[in-house]
Image (cartoon, helix red, strand yellow):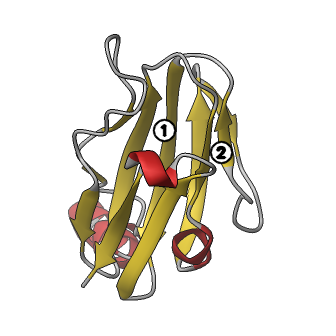
Amino acid sequence: MRLSACALALLLAAPAAAGDLTRGRTDLPDLVLGAEDNDYAVPVRDIEMEAGKSYRLRITAKGQKEYKFFAPEFFRGVWMNQIVINHLEVHMAGPPHHLEFDDQGTIAVEFVTVRAGTFPWTIQGLESRGMSGTFVVK
C-alpha cells in the first residue's frame, strides 16, 4: 500500500517538474566584449536558440571601455528568470532597459525564449566599431 502511495505521489509530481522551463538550462557561448589588446573585439556576434527553451548567457567585458549592452526587442521576447552579477541575483517583473559594464566583469542572464525571430544587440555608441550582433530564435 505504501509503495502504491509513493508511486502515485511521484506520478503527480512529475508533470509539475516537467512544466518548469527553467530546469535543464543550456549554456550559450559567452558573449565577450573587448580584449586585452583590442577594446572593440567581439569573437562571437551571432547566437542561435530555440523558442520555448531555457538558456544562460554570460556577457563578459574584457576591454577597457564602458560598454552599454542594448537588446530591447530580445529582452521583450524572453521570459527573464534572473540576472546574476558576482553571485548576486536580480529578479524582475519585466525586461531590463540595458546592461552596463563600467569595469571588466561578467553578467549572467538566465531566461526562457518565448518569441521566435532575429533580434539585434548593440553596444551603444560602438556599433560602427563592430560591436553588434544578433540573437536568432527559431
Mark number displayed over residue 127 = none
Which one is earlier in the sequence, the residue at label 2 or at label 1?
2
At horizontal 32% and vertical 82% (from top left) the residue drawn is 51
Quarter of the view holding residue 67: top right
Residue flagged by tag 1: what amino acid is it?
Ala
Residue flagged by tag 2: what amino acid is it?
Leu
* Side of 74 relative to 132 (left or right): right
Q: Is residue 93 above or below residue 65?
A: below
At horizontal 40% and vertical 38% (from top left) the residue drawn is 58
Question: Mark 1: few, some, or many residues within 10 Å (few <14, many ≥20)?
Answer: some
- Disc 2 to disc 1, C-alpha distance: 11 Å
At horizontal 35% and vertical 57% (from top left) the residue drawn is 55
The residue where tag 1 is placed is 108
Mark number displayed over residue 99 = 2
Q: Is the N terminus in the top left, top right, bottom left or bottom right quadrant?
A: bottom left
Callout 1: SS: strand
